[in-house]
Image (tube, helix red, strand yellow):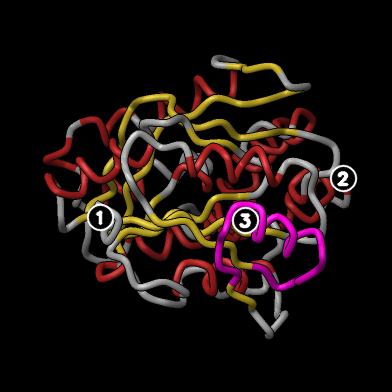
Amino acid sequence: MEDIHTFVVLAYKKSNMLEECINSVLNQSIKTNVVIATSTPNDYISNMAKKYKLDIIINKERKGIGYDFDFASNCVDTPLVTIAHQDDIYDENYAEEVIAAYKKYPKASIIFTDYYEIKNNKKVVNNINLKIKRILLLPLRIKKLSGFKFIKRSVLRFGNAIGCPTVTFVSNNTPKDKFKSNMKCDIDWYAWEKLSKLKGNFIFIPKKIMGHRIHEESTTTEIINSNIRTKEDLYMFKKFWPDKIAKIINKFYSKSEKNNNLK
């Protein structure tokens, strides 16, 4: 099993949540690989790697967030790669579920799950935005439809319904430069839109088996506060809709930024 899947823990600067993330990926129900990738090497990350006997893979080219994500997804050789964000946690059956899905759908480009949020150290299973995402993802519950371009794009047409940290990439079925862009916030939505036009199924596992942490120090929160996200959202909506319609949808979508719920 260990040669199939790798968690690449993407570490940045010094996060006091890194250790919890590492523990969650090490304590999976089946054996899997775990490495740390970073573009900001420091003593804190090194000490954490030594404590858990993990290899560190250093990205020496700091070009931006999208490039960091591409580096993380390409720095190992296993068929399946999950970029584990340092602030997030994975339930013990995450890897097991993803590997089982891959064996059943080897032509998938991405395999991803439902998730819950972690706010103020409390588990939030349902809120308005999570419910909206689950509604948008309903077409992908029909696995026979998950390879059709129209269906894949339909789950992205009204917003980014796919939670980035829930995603596992099938390495041989995805390009190496899927995240490459100058974006700061919508790099994942940009990647899914790019992949939606290529061959490969979007396999959705409708189980809440990972936790995405929402907190004031997160990169997403910082970007939202600087209003960059609204501009990038509009850019993405224009990939699916005429300009006028895209602007109308974006006005409604931007309201979600207040709670940092759609990333």
Amino acid at pointer 1: Lys
Q: Residue at x 36, y 74 (%)?
A: 175
- The answer for how far apart the CA atoms under marks 2 and 3 are is 14 Å
Residue marked by disc 1: 149
Cβ–Cβ under 8 Å for marks 1 and 3: no
Q: Earlier in the sequence, mark 2 or mark 1?
A: 1
Magenta segment range? 38-56
Q: Residue 80, which numbered label?
A: none
Amino acid at pointer 3: Asp
| Furthest-bottom residue in this view | 61
Nearest the eye: 190 or 166: 166
Relative to 189, is 247 on the left or the right?
right
Q: Residue 225, which numbered label?
A: 2
Look at the image and say whether residue 47 sits in the magenta stretch: yes
- The answer for how far apart the CA atoms under marks 2 and 1 are is 34 Å
* Mark in front: 1 vs 3: 3
Q: Secondary structure at mark 1?
A: helix
Q: Residue at x 85, y 37 (%)?
A: 216
* Mark in front: 2 vs 1: 2
Q: Secondary structure at mark 3?
A: loop
Q: Are there few (<14), some (14-19), or many (20+) residues within 10 Å of tag 2?
A: few
Q: Residue 223: where, in percent of width, then height?
A: 80, 52
Q: Residue 173: where, in percent of width, then height?
A: 26, 67
Residue marked by disc 3: 186
